Image (spheres, grey):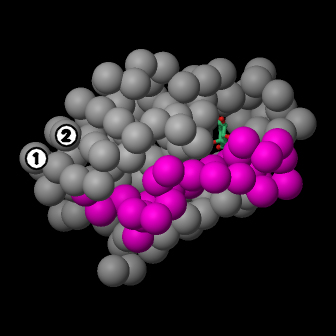
Amino acid sequence: MTKVFVLNGPNLGRLGTRQPEVYGAVTYAQLAEHVAATGEGLGLDVDVRQTDHEGQMIEWLHEAADADAWVVINAGAWTHYSYAVADAAALVNYVEVHISNVYAREEFRHHSVLSAGAKGVIVGCGVGGYDLALAHIAAR
Ligand code: DQA
């Protein structure tokens, strides 16, 4: 069974109340439950996590590398500047997801330090972007 870590970065635990006009009304708990169910339906072994701590994210990426797991990552704002997260992500196969269309937002969100190393990038599809990422991994 393909193992997939679905890793969420800073402030994503606030989904549901954080800028619902941008990120929608689905809470993080609902997202985590939904993503786990999608993974199960696709025959994937999915582990969904969220952290506001960069070192924790890096350690989870190391753990994914050691487990030979795929990663779906929404690195939140780290996407735009964290070379440390990008270096750790380079150890695994990953699909980058953003709930919002970052290209329709502030200039600083237009650049991702993760995209060049990603196997795929899904932007602006809402929380359904996680389903698309899992479907892509399951189809490989
Ligand atoms: C985000 C977009 C980032 O710019 C932002 O910092 C986030 C969420 C998204 O899912 O749309 O925290 O990654």
Judge whether residue 117 is colored magenta: yes
What residue is rendered at 38% in x and 80% in y? 139
- The relative height of residue 93 versus residue 76 in the rendered view (above or below) is below
**Which amino acid is tagged 1?**
Asp
In depth, the one of 75 and 71 nearer the eye is 75
What residue is rendered at 47% in x and 53% in y? 114
Image coordinates for residue 74, horizontal then vertical, percent: 52, 44
In depth, the one of 3 and 108 nearer the eye is 108
Image coordinates for residue 69, horizontal then vertical, percent: 22, 55
Image coordinates for residue 5, horizontal then vertical, percent: 32, 47
Distance of label 1 from label 2 (alpha carbons): 6 Å
Element class at badge 2: helix
Indicate if the residue with disc 1 has its beta carbon within 8 Å of ligand 1.
no
Q: Give the extent of the magenta segment.
A: 92-119
Which residue appears farthest toward the bottom when viewing the image? 140
What residue is rendered at 30% in x and 33% in y? 58
Instruction: Specify few, some or many for label 2: CA neighbours under 10 Å numbering under 14, 14-19, or 20 or more.
Output: some
Residue where numbered disc 1 is placed:
66
Image coordinates for residue 50, horizontal then vertical, percent: 45, 29
Residue where numbered disc 2 is placed:
62
Element class at badge 1: helix
